[in-house]
Image (cartoon, rainbow, N blue to C red):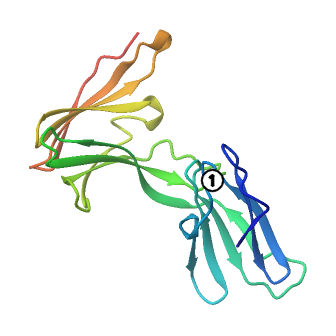
Amino acid sequence: MIERGENAGFFGPSTVRIKYGKEYLETSIHNDGMDLNDTNVSVEWLNNEQAFITLDGDEQIPEVIEFKRNYRKDTNPFKVIHKNLGYITFEKSYSPGHENVIEYRAVTFSLGSSQRVKTSPIRVYYGKAKTELTKFVEIQAGSIDRQEYDYFQSGWVDDTEVQITAMKKGKDYVDYPVHLFTLHLDKGVLEDHYVEAQS
């Protein structure tokens, strides 16, 4: 992969070209005006003939390009694909004593994907701060549709109990709760509470 031309500067993307022999695919990486480096590109080889190339920047959802070595001269070996990238952290909150942390994670798809999983669960990972989080509870679609909230509020009771409020942005800058949960970190239990619908 090569960067074409000079860095676009503030607010502009960098143009890049991915080449194999004489074939290539040209695209761009939005990296907040910063120079590109090897952290902006990763390659996952499936075998000697096929790989996934992921382009990432500070101001974009990752873009995934599939490479398939072709022996036909009239076929480009590069193709932008829509890929499930797994659960990505979009919010986090520390307990009052900074002993524990929770992270809200949702399924994310690669750039340009037309697939939107409206009913996918939100995972709330939890555990000791500054450690790799492996334990989680799920907020199922039956409890809250992902499209029904705009953000979460975390109200810690103490270092092992946190109240999670799913919030919706309302008219005239008045936000309101759409669902309430209590997470007990020491027990790994998520309690579901009813919130009266807004009129």
- Residue 139 quadrant: top left
Q: Residue at x 15, y 38 (%)?
A: 96
Amino acid at circle 1: Leu
Q: Residue at x 30, y 47 (%)?
A: 103
Q: Is residue 51 above or below residue 56?
A: below
Is residue 163 or residue 30 the one in the foreground?
30
Relative to 84, is 65 on the left or the right? right
Query: Which quarter of the rendered picture does the C terminus lie within?
Result: top left
- Residue 72 quadrant: bottom right
Q: Residue at x 51, y 47 (%)?
A: 117
Query: Which quarter of the rendered picture does the N terminus lie within?
Result: bottom right
Q: Position of residue 109 (x, y in %)?
A: 55, 54
Mark 1 Cα-neighbour bin, 10 Å: few <14, some 14–19, many ≥20: some
- Count of marks, rendered view: 1
Q: Is residue 21 above or below residue 156?
A: below
Q: Position of residue 169 (x, y in %)?
A: 45, 21
Judging by the rendered image, the residue that carries numbered circle 1 is 111
Q: Position of residue 76 (x, y in %)?
A: 82, 74
Is residue 1 or residue 87 the one in the foreground?
1
Q: Position of residue 98 (x, y in %)?
A: 16, 45
- Residue 159 quadrant: top left
Check disc 1 and report its element: helix, strand or loop: loop
Task: Work out which residue is located at the far right of the displayed protein and give it.
Answer: 74
